């Protein structure tokens, strides 16, 4: 009975796709588990080498496939590949928000923050806050007609 209740809670929690980076944000995202911090099991992470490699169309595709929100765990100024990664990531974020709007989705369904290798507590807090915001928006569902 408790198992079914837990699954029901998980089913109602917003599904969040996180784009993370191998060297910078991944360790900070992995750290909550070993630190006994918790965030929703409906958060899924895809690792990439660099934030600037994210395509705005991936954000739209994630929403179209049923994710309620997309969180970009950015390198910030720590990117080992590009000195202008933070500026590129800001452009990706702007383009992703425009693309969502063009397809009838709320631009608030995508968020970005710099997550460092020891940012377990900030990442956990971002997931809780983003989950609450997405709950307020409701399921991503179909694009508005």
Image (spheres, rainbow, N blue to C red):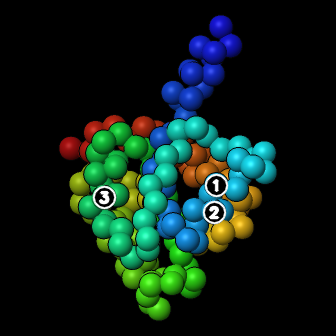
As measured in the structure, the alpha-carbon distance from the residue carrying label 1 to the one carrying label 3 is 23 Å
Q: Measured from the top left, where is residue 43 in percent x and y?
A: 53, 45
Residue at the disc numbered 2: 27
Nearest the eye: 19 or 87: 19
- Residue 115 horizontal side relative to residue 33, left or right: left
Residue at 74% across, 58% down: 121
Q: Residue at x 35, y 72 (%)?
A: 53
Q: Quadrant of the C terminus?
A: top left
Image location of residue 143, percent across then percent down = 27, 44
Q: Circle 3 is placed at which residue position?
A: 58
Please say if the residues under marks 1 and 2 sit with CB atoms less than 8 Å apart.
yes
Return the residue at label 1.
Answer: 30
Given residues 118 and 95, the one toward you in this image is 118
Viewer-side label of 1, 3: 1
* C-beta proximity under 8 Å, tags 3 and 2: no
Q: Secondary structure at mark 3?
A: helix
Measuring from the top left, give residue 72's x and y in whole percent: 48, 63
Location of residue 132 in the rendering, given as x and y in whole percent from the top left corner: 60, 45
């Amino acid at each position: 009975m408790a198992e079914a209740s837990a699954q029901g809670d998980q089913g109602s929690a917003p599904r969040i796709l996180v784009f993370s980076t191998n060297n910078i944000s991944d360790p900070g995202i992995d750290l909550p588990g070993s630190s006994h911090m918790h965030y929703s099991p409906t958060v899924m992470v895809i690792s990439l080498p660099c934030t600037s490699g994210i395509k705005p169309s991936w954000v739209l595709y994630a929403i179209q496939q049923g994710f309620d929100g997309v969180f970009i765990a950015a390198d910030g100024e720590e990117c080992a590949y590009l000195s202008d990664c933070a500026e590129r990531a800001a452009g990706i974020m702007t383009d992703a928000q425009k693309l969502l709007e063009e397809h009838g989705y709320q631009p608030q369904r995508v968020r970005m923050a710099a997550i460092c290798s020891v940012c377990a507590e900030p990442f956990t807090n971002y997931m809780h806050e983003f989950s609450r915001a997405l709950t307020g928006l409701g399921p991503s569902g179909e694009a508005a007609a």
